[in-house]
């Protein structure tokens, strides 16, 4: 499976499909932004390993935030991981598959994938 298919569902889980959504405001400047609720640490990480120059404000741009999310997932999961791997890494970071707390997130993503017939 490609991360693109899973990211369509992740956008629903994270922001309800709202590219201007904000979350985790208790984190101050490190709060989550956009469709995928990308935090600045993810932008910095992608810029570091991909040699890109994304800005935090790019998280509100649907196209650029998709690129950021895809680069992140492909870097940490590869290009042919399972939907579960992509979802749990997105939710829990590079070691998300090892975290029990990402299991519930995966169940929500899996349910929506079934409802929306994403294969």
Image: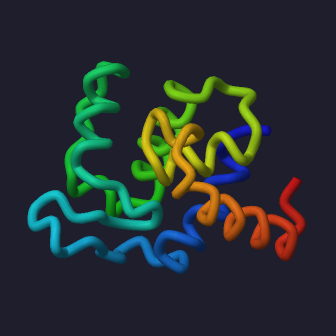
Q: Residue furthest left?
A: 28
Q: Is residue 59 above or below residue 34?
A: above
Residue 85: image location, x then y, percent: 66, 40
Q: Is residue 50 above or below residue 56?
A: above
Q: How many numbered marks, from 0 up?
A: 0
2 to the left or right of 105: right
Tell me the quarter of the picture where residue 46 sits. Answer: top left
Which color scheme did the rendering employ for the protein? Answer: rainbow
The N terminus lies in quadrant: top right
Residue 119: image location, x then y, percent: 88, 53
76 to the left or right of 79: left
Going 76% across and 38% down the picture, which residue do you hit? 82
Q: Is residue 33 above or below residue 73?
A: below
Q: Nearer the viewer, residue 19 or 114?
A: 114
Tell me the quarter of the picture where residue 93 sits. Answer: top left
Going 45% across and 34% down the picture, which residue do you hit? 94
24 to the left or right of 86: left
Going 73% across and 38% down the picture, which residue do you hit? 2
Residue 91: image location, x then y, percent: 49, 54
Q: Nearer the viewer, residue 8 or 95?
A: 95
Q: Nearer the viewer, residue 55 or 49?
A: 49
Residue 64: image location, x then y, percent: 41, 49
Q: Residue furthest front?
A: 100
Going 49% across and 70% down the picture, which residue do you hit? 14
């Amino acid at each position: 499976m490609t991360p693109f298919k899973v990211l369509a569902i992740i956008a629903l889980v994270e922001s309800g499909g709202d590219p201007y959504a904000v979350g985790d405001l208790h984190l101050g400047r490190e709060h989550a932004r956009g469709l995928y609720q990308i935090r600045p640490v993810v932008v910095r990480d992608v810029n570091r390993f991909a040699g890109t120059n994304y800005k935090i404000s790019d998280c509100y741009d649907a196209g650029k935030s998709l690129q950021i999310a895809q680069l992140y997932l492909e870097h940490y999961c590869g290009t042919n991981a399972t939907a579960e791997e992509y979802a749990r890494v997105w939710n829990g970071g590079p070691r998300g598959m090892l975290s029990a707390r990402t299991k519930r997130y995966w169940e929500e993503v899996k349910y929506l994938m079934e409802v929306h017939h994403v294969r």
